[in-house]
Image: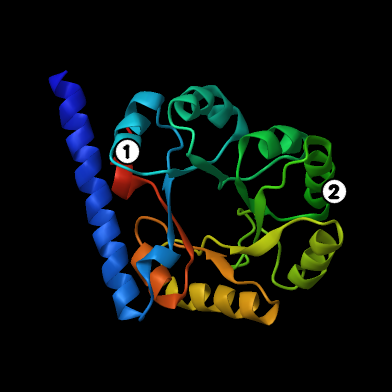
Amino acid sequence: MEAETASAETASDRLHAVREHMARAARTADRKVDDITLIAVSKFHDADAIAPLIEAGQRVFGENRVQEAARKWPVLRERTPDIALHLVGQLQSNKADDAVQLFDAIHSLDRSSLVGALAKAMDRHDRRPACFIQVNIGDEPQKGGCTIAALPALLSEARTAGLPVGGLMCVPPLEVEPAPYFALLGKLARDHGLSELSMGMSADYATAITIGATHVRVGTALFGPRT
């Protein structure tokens, strides 16, 4: 019992610290922090590690893999029905059905084949998770995301297929200043009439907020380092 209480207090402290940091960044940019969604990225963390954050009030969580989310979230959501679950990792087309049934938002739409798979799955299950197009903002071959040049065609295809695309997502290159990449994603979103920006993680979410992020994906700052 003592270990559970310590875990809950640690989760509550971390959540409070992140929310305070978000609020300061929002004030710097003359924004309302309530307009920014904090996604607690719970990949590789089991239900026992997630539960204290839920108890502390966090309601939006992110997972990288459909299979992992399917193992741990049904029971957690049964206990707390108002949880929103976001897929923030790469999605295989053959997992589109499962993703549409499980997630409330998908941040990794990045290719034509996935547009078709998601459109069919949404029609089949009469469920329409919000979609973000992932842009390979640093043009890195090892990362997912469509190229900047391919974005207009992919967005047009997704809209024609009836996908609810509301914004763009990116992961900037490591160990460089992320601000120019965040600013570029913001410009791309404005140019294409999109209002939402999924950008910023534990190391740089405050910077992302000052540049316009509407969704920040925070893992380590909330859960601590993974063992």
User: Going from the N terminus, do you reach mark 1 or mark 2 first?
Assistant: 1
Helix, strand or loop at label 2? It is helix
* Residue occupying image coordinates x 70% and y 39%: 100
Q: Depth-wise, is mark 1 or mark 2 nearer the camera?
A: 1
Q: Is residue 139 left or right of residue 94?
A: left
Q: Is residue 104 left or right of residue 127?
A: left
Q: From the image, which quarter does the C terminus lie in?
A: top left
Q: From the image, which quarter does the N terminus lie in?
A: top left
Tell how many labels. 2
Q: Would you place residue 96 above or below residue 216 in this image?
A: above
Identify which amino acid the numbered label 2 is placed on: Gly
- The tag on residue 116 is 2
- The tag on residue 53 is 1
Does residue 14 appear anywhere in the picture? Answer: yes
* Residue occupying image coordinates x 45% and y 27%: 76
The local crowd at label 2, few if under 14, some if 14 to 19, many if 20 or more residues have their Cα within 10 Å, is some
Please tell me which residue lies in front, 20 or 188: 20
Identify which amino acid the numbered label 1 is placed on: Leu
Q: Would you place residue 178 above or below residue 169 in this image?
A: below
Helix, strand or loop at label 1? It is helix
How far across and how far down the image is residue 163, in percent? 77, 55
How far across and how far down the image is residue 204, in percent? 37, 64
Where residue 22 sits, quadrant-wise, is bottom left
Where residue 87 sits, quadrant-wise, is top right
Q: Is residue 63 left or right of residue 49?
A: right
How far across and how far down the image is residue 52, in percent? 29, 33
